[in-house]
Image: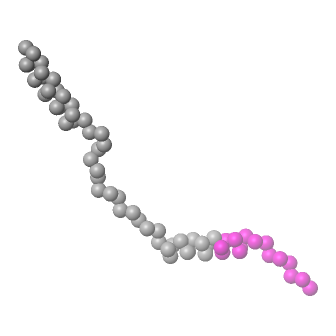
Amino acid sequence: MKKVMMLVAVVLGTTVMVNAQTAPAKAAPAKEVKADKKADKKVKVAKADKKMEAAPAAPAKK
């Protein structure tokens, strides 16, 4: 009887250890997308243009 209980404990222990994963399997790393420098420059230019348009025009001196 003692041998049967030891066998059950070993089988259950092994099953638990095999199925216990601390972290999921690693997936393929995601590819990083770099920002387009031209697009960033266009955004900066557009913001500068908007600021110029929003600025009130100074009255001309006579």
* Left or right relative to 19: residue 3: left
Q: Residue at 92% across / 85% down in the picture?
A: 62
Q: Quadrant of residue 59?
A: bottom right
Q: Residue at 18% across / 28% down in the picture?
A: 13
Q: Nearer the viewer, residue 39 or 20?
A: 20
Q: Quadrant of residue 29?
A: bottom left
* Left or right relative to 61: residue 50: left
Q: Residue at 57% across / 71% down in the picture?
A: 43
- Residue 46: x %, y % from top left: 61, 73
Farthest residue toward the right? 62
Farthest residue toward the top? 1
Q: Nearer the viewer, residue 29 or 61?
A: 29
- Residue 9: x %, y % from top left: 15, 23
Farthest residue toward the front? 2
- Residue 24: x %, y % from top left: 29, 44
Query: Magenta residues, as a range?
Result: 48-62
Q: Nearer the viewer, residue 52 or 28?
A: 28
Q: For the N terminus, which image quadrant?
A: top left
Is 4 colored magenta in this rendering? no
* Left or right relative to 19: residue 57: right
Q: Residue at 69% across / 71% down in the picture?
A: 51
